[in-house]
Amino acid sequence: MRYYSTNRQVPDVTLAEALLQGQASDRGLFLPEHFPQLTHEDLLNLVDLSYPEIAYQILRRFTQGIFDDETVLRLCEDAYTYDIPLEHVADRQYVMRLDQGPTASFKDFAACMMARWMGQLMAHESGELVILTATSGDTGSAVAHAYLGVDRVHVVILFPIEEVSDRQRRQMTTLGGNVTTIGIEGKFDDGQAMVKQAFADPELKDIRLTSANSINIGRLLPQAVYYFYAYVRLANVKAGEEVIFSVPSGNFGDMMGGVIARQMGLPIQKFIIATNANDEVPNFLRTGQYDPVIPSRVCISNAMNVGHPSNLARLIDIYGGQMDEKGKLITQPDMDRLRKDIFAVSINDDQTRATIRSAYQQHKLILEPHGAVGWAGLQDYITKESVPSDMLCISLETAHPAKFPEEIQALVGIEPATPPSLEGLEERDEEYPVFSINYEPFRDFLRKQFASSPTASVE
Ligand SMILES: *Cc1c(COP(=O)(O)O)cnc(C)c1O
């Protein structure tokens, strides 16, 4: 299986190269040249399998030629040791809780697998790899935990100091070891821009840099798995029943996992993509014109404060269009087909809070802000389109409510129980330098830390 860049200016690469490069050198994003197909029979065969076994069945179709099947299965069994609750709410509406992993957000699903893949690859490579990642809240901790202690890999995380919760920050800054966390006096987009500038910087060319943001294909493929899992657990697979998924979205990596699952043959009738007030994608679907939100808007669903989602280029590619890394539409995608497959809606903070309250009052359903955006989007669609009550609908809850205790306490008057993964954070020592959004000091820091010959400055 080969992987091509959405900008189409570089030759196709293998999965190993795509993983280690992160972004293609023409600044496009990698996508598989075709999507392996699962037949109805294949889907039926997934029904009785455990999550790690389903992950193996999906992922081995992408890793062939890079890792042997035995290794893929072992890594799946090693990574996926936690529950994926499918909580029944009403009619045939469910919430899939992707919040039981080591850092209590859905990002654990992909970060854990990508780190294992890269660890395998680095065992056969010389030198060291530096993973640079900007985070809007949860990527940082998921990536940091996944790579902690992986040989010859360093992780550098940039986070906006004003936009992450205390718990989110402490999950990254208390690790030490091969993990360096940097606070940025700016927004997620500023951190993202600094990371992108570093990737393109000739002065850093002697440092082997790569990304663990969802521009890396390794962050997407494992996210196709839970769509299959939820489907085979809840649907009438035999009858080929269709399903609706609602996905709270920021950088659109989570949704792209679902799109990949659909391309592979999962009968997804519709995606609801629910954003917070950063409504550039709902606007794009409505008007066909794309305008990033700059600067991005600060919302309580902080991990979705994204004004120009990097994965949009992939979605547009799959729908026959082309968008460059700056968000310029080079070829318009098939808008009719996009609108048929996707219902996009923006949910503001007031609606998010009202949803957290009403979900608890009506159903005893405990949602945190991101999951509430997804749930509100689903309810909006069900009402607008008069979706019949026997339609299977699954809304994704992407973080554990205990990551946002203040908000939930204030809205519904309960303190969400803290999962073991979040316990004891307050007592650990924190360490992180703080940088402005000027690029140069950040670059000098990277050179000092990681360049093999830090004195050979070009200045
Ligand atoms: C990252 C994140 C999202 C958004 O996911 P994308 O893949 O960026 O769309 C939603 N919820 C939570 C809790 C997150 O951490």
Image (cartoon, rainbow, N blue to C red):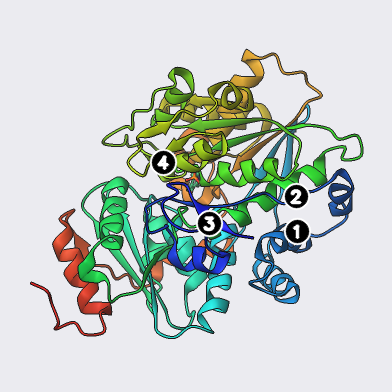
Q: Can residue 252 be seen in this view?
A: yes
Counting other residues with Cα less than 10 Å from the Cα at mark 3, is it few (<14), some (14-19), or many (20 or more)?
Answer: many
Residue hosting label 4: 309
Going by the numbered disc 3, the residue's amino acid type is Ile
Q: Which residue is drawn at 42% across and 57% down?
A: 24
Q: Residue at x 44, y 21 (%)?
A: 288
If you read the primary sequence from the N terminus, does the residue marked by circle 1 or circle 2 appear first? 1
Residue 409 in the image: x percent, y percent?
48, 41
Q: Is residue 240 left or right of residue 222?
A: right
Mark 3 in CB contact with mark 2 (< 8 angstroms): no
The mark closer to the camera, 4 or 2, is 4
Quadrant in the picture for residue 196: bottom left
Tag 1–tag 2 contact (CB < 8 Å): yes
Which amino acid, mark 2?
Tyr
Circle 1 is placed at which residue position? 51
Q: Name the residue under label 2.
A: 229
Is label 4 or label 3 in front?
A: 3
How far separated are the C-alphas under marks 1 and 3?
21 Å
Q: Distance between the residues labelled 1 and 2?
A: 7 Å
Q: Distance between the residues labelled 3 and 2?
A: 20 Å
Label 1 beta carbon less than 8 Å to ligand 1: no
In the figure, 116 relative to 236: above or below?
below
Q: Mark 3 points at which residue?
A: 217
Foreground mark, 3 or 2? 3
Secondary element at image label 2: helix
Q: Please give the name of the residue rendered at 37% of the width and 76% of the height, measured from the top-left corner.
A: 176
- Look at the numbered discs 4 and 2 and tell me whether their residues touch, using CB distance below 8 Å: no
Circle 2 packing at 10 Å, graded few (<14), some (14-19), many (20+), is many
Apparent side of residue 176 relative to residue 409 in the rendered image (left or right): left
Query: Could you give the CA–CA distance between mark 4 and mark 3, rounded to whole angstroms?
Result: 15 Å
In the image, residue 397 above or below residue 420: above
